[in-house]
Image: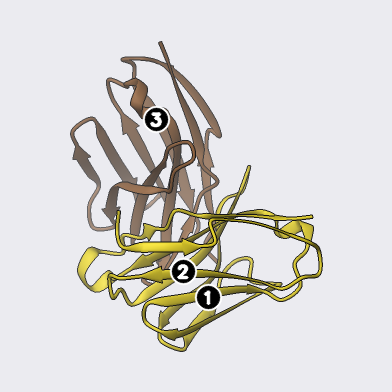
Chain colours: A yellow, B brown
Amino acid sequence: DAGITQSPRHKVTETGTPVTLRCHQTENHRYMYWYRQDPGHGLRLIHYSYGVKDTDKGEVSDGYSVSRSKTEDFLLTLESATSSQTSVYFCAISDRDRTNNEQFFGPGTRLTVL
Amino acid sequence: GENVEQHPSTLSVQEGDSAVIKCTYSDSASNYFPWYKQELGKRPQLIIDIRSNVGEKKDQRIAVTLNKTAKHFSLHITETQPEDSAVYFCAATPRDDKIIFGKGTRLHILP
């Protein structure tokens, strides 16, 4: 697997609390992505980054914010978690200049909001 | 924005038979179409991809076909084996830095 890790791998939290998920890569890839995966919905893009401090919204960005202060880290923040944000979150990286858009996924974070 | 439809949502085939999964896309600007496989409890991984200047691509038992005019593409798996059981996702790229996924097909290989 590409050098990509996610932390934490599992988290249980309560409605209304802030949550930050971290994605860390050692591949020096330019692009980083956050997806959520839910039964019947496949993989839906939340936010992505095309460089340090450069981010853009995906399909389901409401309720989420991101930050990328350095190449290797991409943070996803739920300012006030809701039960509808219970999901498995995947980070992905790509470097389209070298690998033709292939995205490499992290191991995932299972988030439960009670 | 781009919309990717994938069918069927579930597919069961006898071991040794072929499996076909079909996808359609809406944005004619999309030019890259990857397929990802996700085994139970694992992360998605790329298995094959095709660019819009190619009509078909094969890699051993898997192949992908693309019809740009009709905006649809398909994954074909021949001589299916138990290890082919997984969820398969098609995707399209409306822009070079963004990939939109279909909802996935759960493939069961029956003994």
Q: Percent position (x, y) of residue A51?
A: 39, 84
Q: Secondary structure at mark 2?
A: strand
Q: Percent position (x, y) of residue A75?
A: 53, 75
Chain to which mark 2 belongs:
A
To which quarter of the image does residue A3 belong?
bottom left
Check disc 1 and report the residue beneath it.
Answer: A75
Nearer the observer: mark 2 or 3; the answer is 2
**1 and 3 marks in contact (CB < 8 Å):** no
Up-down: is A37 above or below A98?
Answer: above
Check disc 2 and report the residue beneath it.
Answer: A23
Assign the C terminus of chain A to one quadrant of the image: bottom right
Left/right placement of residue B51 relative to residue A72 reads left
**2 and 1 marks in contact (CB < 8 Å):** yes
Numbered tag placed on residue B20 in the rendering: 3
Chain to which mark 1 belongs:
A
Q: Amino acid at mark 3?
A: Val
